[in-house]
């Protein structure tokens, strides 16, 4: 245990130092195992089960809390530690998890067991693991009795995996007092990684691609499959999708992506470093863009708007030309323009096919600044705890509930101090989701150290 962690733990308790640190880590591992075993798979969610679990812990600690269901079974819970007049901090997590097909897992989906040094089960990474770090930090601050310079709010919500409308979105409309006088927020979206050479980089999500979920609807004359017409609802949908395939959105660079790629270039091999350091010029080379698309699809997605074709439907019978057909698109756009503009541009591209574009969901773009005490704390604390490490502002291709809070003007960061080794299996949204127990134990103290740096003067 290094000097910084010794100081942090010593200020938090009167127990012998190593005993306290070990005790909190043991508690956190046990909480995570129990949390994973609670079925909050969304759909249907049933997040009230998680609320009951967390409420029991708060009651045992003597912490007051509030709960609210946005719909039957869709529970949310929050608790507050009172502090000074500085803008408050929210520790935000979602308690729902995505479905899993147990046929393709080697363990029970909601196991919570420890095997070969890994804590196993859906939610171990996304995001019950980080949520447990939030819980451990919140309780450590409470137990310490140290005077805080700001309010600290623990908030566990429903429905993030389906858009957050029964969670943070609903709370903003129906329990706005939770977010009053809040200036900063920590959520999912970032993480630590260690290369084969031992270099550690922490990504802090400051913005994300904006989800724009669309349905293409087509209506045409129905008929018998034996007598094809010149157009049909199905051929209109196919023509629109083919147009999208043949016309990929052009690459463009926004400020946070440019900074992120430049920072990544420092640790890259010579074949990539030059292009990443000057990504604005690199994207002018079609060969580089194609190679990036093939070999690094995640980074390619940060350079352009994208649309994935995920669902479609036509006739219910093979020999019937249907009057209606539809397809759904999961589009993600860079946060430098409104979704309305993107949809209008898409309509200009495929409108000639006669399809109608219906918006299922579209969020607003927002970017959090990095000139804050919280960001500086993340930098200084991680560098103290992991000498030689670096912190990079990053852009997420996925979305989190931070888009709601950024719309409120709250500086929101995706940050997780847990370090994943290069090539390590995580199973996020996939099979055999897991988190290393040793890395998780270290992250318990590391996350507390970051938060303490911000909430105690």
Image: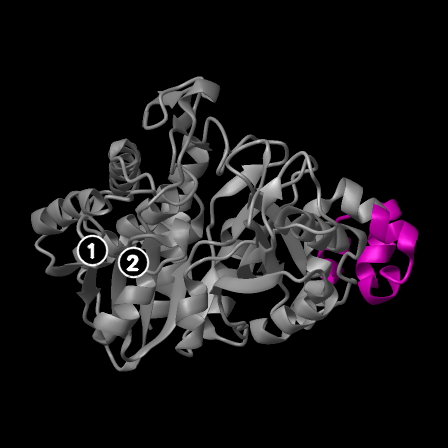
Q: Indicate yes or no whether the magenta region holds residue 163.
A: no
Q: Which residue lies at the image location 17% right of the left edge and 42% below the top edge?
A: 53
| Residue 33, disc | none
Tell me if mark 1 has few (under 14), some (14-19) or many (20+) residues whose alpha carbon lies within 10 angstroms of its own. few
Q: Position of residue 406 (x, y in %)?
A: 44, 72
Residue span colored magenta: 261-290
Q: Which residue lies at the image location 65% right of the left edge and 54% below the top edge?
A: 307
Circles 1 and 2 in contact, beta carbons < 8 Å: yes
Between 267 and 156, the one lying in front of the other is 156
Above or below residue 207? Residue 384 is above
Q: Which residue has dot 1 on it? A: 71
Position of 147 compared to 225: left or right? left
Position of 442 compared to 340: left or right? left
Q: Earlier in the sequence, mark 1 or mark 2?
A: 1
- Residue 423: quarter of image: top right
Q: Secondary structure at mark 1?
A: loop
Q: Which residue lies at the image location 71% right of the left edge and 62% below the top edge?
A: 350
| Residue 166, disc | 2
Q: Which residue lies at the image location 33% right of the left edge and 66% below the top edge?
A: 169
Above or below residue 187? Residue 368 is below
Q: Position of residue 373 (x, y in %)?
A: 46, 73
Which image quadrant: the C terminus? bottom left
Q: Secondary structure at mark 2?
A: loop
Q: Is residue 147 visible?
A: yes
| Real-space Cα separation, disc 1 to disc 2, in angstroms | 7 Å
Which image quadrant: the N terminus? top left
Q: Is residue 206 visible?
A: no
Q: Main secondary structure of the magenta part?
A: helix
Above or below residue 26? Residue 267 is below
Tell me if mark 2 has few (under 14), some (14-19) or many (20+) residues whose alpha carbon lies within 10 angstroms of its own. many
């Amino acid at each position: 245990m290094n000097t910084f962690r010794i100081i942090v733990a010593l200020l938090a308790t009167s127990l012998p130092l190593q005993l306290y640190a070990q005790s909190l880590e043991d508690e956190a591992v046990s909480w995570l195992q129990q949390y994973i075993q609670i079925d909050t798979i969304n759909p249907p969610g049933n997040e009230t089960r998680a609320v009951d679990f967390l409420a029991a812990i708060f009651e045992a600690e003597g912490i007051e809390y509030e709960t609210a269901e946005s719909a039957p079974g869709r529970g949310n819970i929050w608790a507050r530690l009172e502090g000074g007049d500085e803008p408050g901090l929210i520790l935000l997590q979602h308690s729902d998890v995505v479905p899993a097909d147990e046929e393709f897992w080697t363990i029970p989906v909601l196991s919570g067991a420890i095997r070969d040094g890994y804590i196993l089960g859906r939610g171990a990474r996304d995001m019950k693991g980080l949520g447990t770090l939030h819980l451990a930090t919140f309780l450590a601050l409470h137990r310490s009795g140290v005077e805080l310079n700001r309010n600290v709010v623990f908030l566990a919500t429903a429905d993030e995996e389906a858009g957050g409308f029964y969670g943070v979105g609903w709370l903003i409309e129906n329990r706005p007092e939770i977010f009053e006088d809040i200036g900063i927020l920590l959520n999912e979206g970032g993480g630590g990684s260690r290369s084969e050479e031992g270099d550690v980089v922490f990504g802090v999500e400051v913005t994300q691609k904006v989800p724009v979920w669309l349905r293409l609807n087509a209506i045409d004359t129905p008929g018998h499959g034996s007598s094809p017409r010149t157009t049909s609802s199905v051929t209109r949908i196919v023509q629109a999708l083919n147009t999208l395939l043949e016309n990929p959105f052009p690459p463009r660079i926004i400020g946070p992506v440019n900074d992120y790629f430049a920072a990544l270039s420092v640790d890259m091999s010579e074949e990539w470093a030059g292009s990443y350091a000057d990504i604005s010029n690199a994207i002018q080379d079609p060969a580089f863009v194609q190679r990036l698309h093939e070999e690094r699809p995640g980074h390619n997605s940060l350079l352009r708007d994208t649309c994935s074709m995920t669902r479609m439907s036509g006739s219910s019978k093979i020999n019937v030309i249907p009057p209606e057909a539809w397809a759904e698109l999961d589009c993600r756009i860079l946060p430098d323009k409104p979704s309305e503009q993107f949809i209008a541009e898409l309509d200009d591209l495929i409108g000639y096919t006669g399809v109608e574009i219906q918006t299922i969901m579209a969020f607003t773009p927002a970017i959090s600044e990095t000139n804050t005490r919280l960001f500086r704390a993340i930098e200084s604390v991680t560098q103290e705890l992991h000498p030689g490490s670096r912190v990079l502002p990053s852009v997420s291709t996925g979305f989190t509930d931070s888009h709601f809070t950024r719309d409120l003007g709250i500086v929101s960061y995706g940050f997780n101090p847990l370090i994943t080794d290069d090539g390590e299996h995580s199973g996020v949204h996939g099979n055999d989701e897991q988190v290393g127990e040793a890395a998780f134990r270290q992250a318990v103290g590391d996350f507390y150290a970051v938060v303490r740096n911000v909430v105690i003067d």
